[in-house]
Each structure stands twice: as C-alpha cells, then as structure tokens.
Amino acid sequence: MEFAEIESLYTGLRVADVRDGMDWIGLFSKGSVARSIRPLIPGSATFGPALTVRGRGSQVQPETMTPEEYTEWARNYWYKKMHIEPYAEEITPGDVLVFESPDLGVGQLGSNNTLKFRTHGANGAVTSGGCRDIDEVRLQGFPVFAQYINQTMTQGRLEYDSHNIPVTVGNVLVRPGDIVVADGDGVIVVPQQHATEVATYARQELEHDKDARRKMYAELGWEPDRSVL
C-alpha cells in the first residue's frame, strides 16, 4: 500500500478510533502495543507503514584502552561494523521505524539518529528499548514512542541484527508494511491486509464521537476546536 493511500485513510484518526476499528472487524485485543511504550513528546502523534528493525545484545567486550584508542575503536569499529544503520537509507517518506530491542539500559535512539531518520522522511519511531538525549529529541519534535529513557551508548551492549523482518514489540507482532498509529493513548499496529477495513470503521466511530461532543460544546457555549471539527 502506497503512503498516499495510507494518508488518505488514516489522517486524523486517533489510536482510540483505530482500536475501535480493529474491534469492529473482530480483531479484539489484537494490535495494541504494551502500555509501557509511551510518547516521549507530550501531544505527539504519528502514523505510517512499519519499517522494522531488530537489535541484539552484544558479546563484544571492549578491551582496556586509552581514551584516544577508545575513540578510534568506537568510531571506526563499533559504529561502522556492529551498531550500523543500513535501514536508514531505505526509509521512504511516511515510514515509522519499529525497533525490537532488548532491555539493556541503552539509548539506541537519540537526538542524532532520530534527526537523521527525519531527514530521510520518516514519520516517527517506536522502540521496545530506550532513547536518550531526551531534551534534544523533544526540541527537534520527532515523534518517538519508547519503553525506556536511558543514558548509555550502545558500544559493547547492543548490535544491529537485521531489518525488514517480522519483529515483536510490546507483545505485538509487527511485519514490514503494517500500519502503525501512535498518540497519547499509546501505539497500535494494524495488519496491512486489514488497513482499509479498519480505517473505514475507525472513521465511522470518530465522526460519531465528534458529532456527540460538538453538540455538547454548543450546550456549554464553547467554540469548536479541531477535535470536534
């Protein structure tokens, strides 16, 4: 499914609406990512096809070395051979990167690589692992939904494994191209073969909700805002 079609189906839909749409077609309790994976930027939201990435714990143990040797090791070995990001070059506009990462106290995502993802046209990132540089990530405005806020770099801890393969994030299977929707209510994943049907009923429920709340806004004398228009 091309992103233009996804955009026409999912623009304006909330996670709650998509959850309803999943229920409407019988996918009860499917797709809802664990509640521990939350937005790092309050009020942020995103949607798009999943570009999946798997990380793995590393058995590499850096030897005792001088700070200068460590700089050389990190820059020319670790980040060129072990913790690589070949998937960044495969990002197409609208993609949401989805990372299956073990809990190693590592900030796999940070201000540098999430900004790189944005320059390639990504719409956001979801990870079962951690993110660091939180203040800069928030300042840059790239939607990140993460399980942990961590401090540690990846060296000797977390390696790249593979990408564009099925991953499990927050107890949910995510396949390349599945539709990821995320906002303040968390993250939900729609199997791509159900994307159109789910969006149809999600839109139905959104419009029903807007209509009901718009009437109550009028009763209260409130000016309509974007949530009811």
Image (cartoon, grey):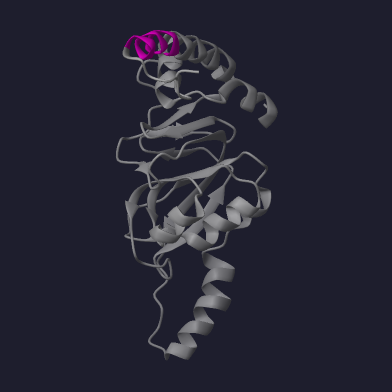
Q: Which residue shows up at 39% across the image and 58% down it?
A: 134
Which residue is more in the foreground, 166 or 37?
A: 37
> Is residue 53 visible in this depiction of the protein?
yes
Q: Report the span colored magenta.
A: 210-219
- Report the quarter where the N terminus lies: top right
Q: Which residue shows up at 62% across the image and 26% down it?
A: 6
- Magenta segment's dominant SS is helix
Q: Position of residue 12 (x, y in %)?
A: 53, 25
Q: Position of residue 143 (x, y in %)?
A: 48, 45
Q: In the picture shown, does residue 28 fall above or below 56?
A: above
> Is residue 2 visible in this depiction of the protein?
no
User: Disc count in the image?
Assistant: 0
Which residue is more in the foreground, 152 or 168?
A: 152
Residue 165 shown left or right of residue 41 in the figure: right
Q: Position of residue 160 (x, y in %)?
A: 51, 58
Residue 63 shown left or right of residue 84 in the figure: left
Which quarter of the figure has residue 170?
Answer: top left
Q: In the picture shown, does residue 18 fall above or below 38?
A: above
Q: In the picture shown, does residue 201 fall above or below 29?
A: above
Assess whether residue 75 is covered by the magenta stretch. Answer: no
Which quarter of the figure has residue 50?
Answer: top right
Which residue is more in the foreground, 154 or 38?
A: 38
Q: Position of residue 128 (x, y in %)?
A: 38, 46
Residue 97 shown left or right of residue 22 in the figure: right
Q: Which residue shows up at 48% across the image and 90% down it?
A: 68
Q: Which residue shows up at 54% across the image and 69% down it?
A: 79
